[in-house]
Image (cartoon, rainbow, N blue to C red):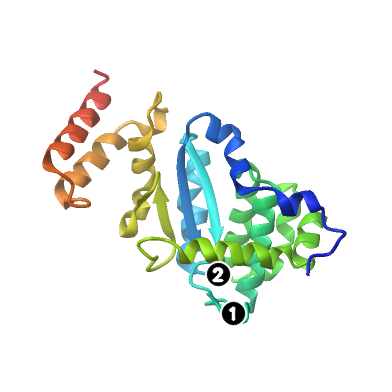
Amino acid sequence: MASPRFPLLLRLVPLVLLCLSPACAAGRVPVSVYYETLCPFCSAFVVNDLARIFHDGVSIADLRLVPFGNGRVSADGSITCQHGEGECQLNAIEACVIRLWPNAEQHFPFVQCVERLALTRKWDAWQSCFQETGLVSQPVIDCYNSGYGRQLELQNAAETNALQPPHQFVPWVVVNGKLLGEDYMNFEAYICSFYDGELPEACKGKHLAIAQHTRTSGGDKRNPNEVAVALAIGIALWFGL
């Protein structure tokens, strides 16, 4: 049961308020990443690829991280994680950090730090990420020790298990409501494709790439006319027409 010392306001913040963030207000493209903290593929994706949203200038993405992945929730509410109890702990810790600092530009460096440690099998040193990122540790420790971190895990489990179609592996990436499946490494092109505003420099060429990919692979069995329109728009954007 959550400790009365833990701020009541934080426990009651409706998820809908997260869309009052500057990212939502600016019309950025929603990107949801369902993952688990000790999955090597997830860690590599976060550290080496997802970070490009911040470092390559693709600032048009509204990133949501949902740590749970392939975990299981039993009938009695107990949680079992694919990579053991340590993963359950880190899922809860990262969930607490995400809730305490909803802005991805604030919480992502911490998540990236933890996942970098996981890649080198040094995840036990996760508390060093507070010093590296400048985030205050005590609110996170309180969140975890109070049991609120577990509540966040259960919320993430419910969201992950409600995905349609159900997730088949992790990381499981959804951009603007579109499941990327095995094409998740191409997430930047999808972000650029869905954005309606003025494209940043990092998006140059990515519209054409996504249109070409859809045409050659058949995509989601879209109407050929829709594919032709998408390709034409991509070409126009590429040449600045």
Residue 64 at x, y percent in the picture: 53, 49
Element on which disc 2 rests:
loop
In the image, residue 57 sits, relative to residue 106, either above or below, namely: above
- Residue at left offset 57%, top offset 39%: 19
Element on which disc 1 rests:
loop
Q: Is residue 205 left or right of residue 2?
A: left
Report how far apart the C-alphas of labels 2 and 1 lie in the structure.
Answer: 9 Å
Q: Nearer the viewer, residue 111 or 121?
A: 111
Instruction: Kindly identify which numbered label has been placed on residue 5.
Output: none
Residue 92 at x, y percent in the picture: 66, 65
Image quarter in which the N terminus is found: bottom right
- Residue at left offset 68%, top offset 68%: 150
Q: Is residue 149 left or right of residue 15?
A: right
Q: Which residue is mark 2?
A: 38
Q: Which residue is mark 1?
A: 84
Q: Is residue 148 left or right of residue 202?
A: right
Q: Is residue 227 left or right of residue 174?
A: left
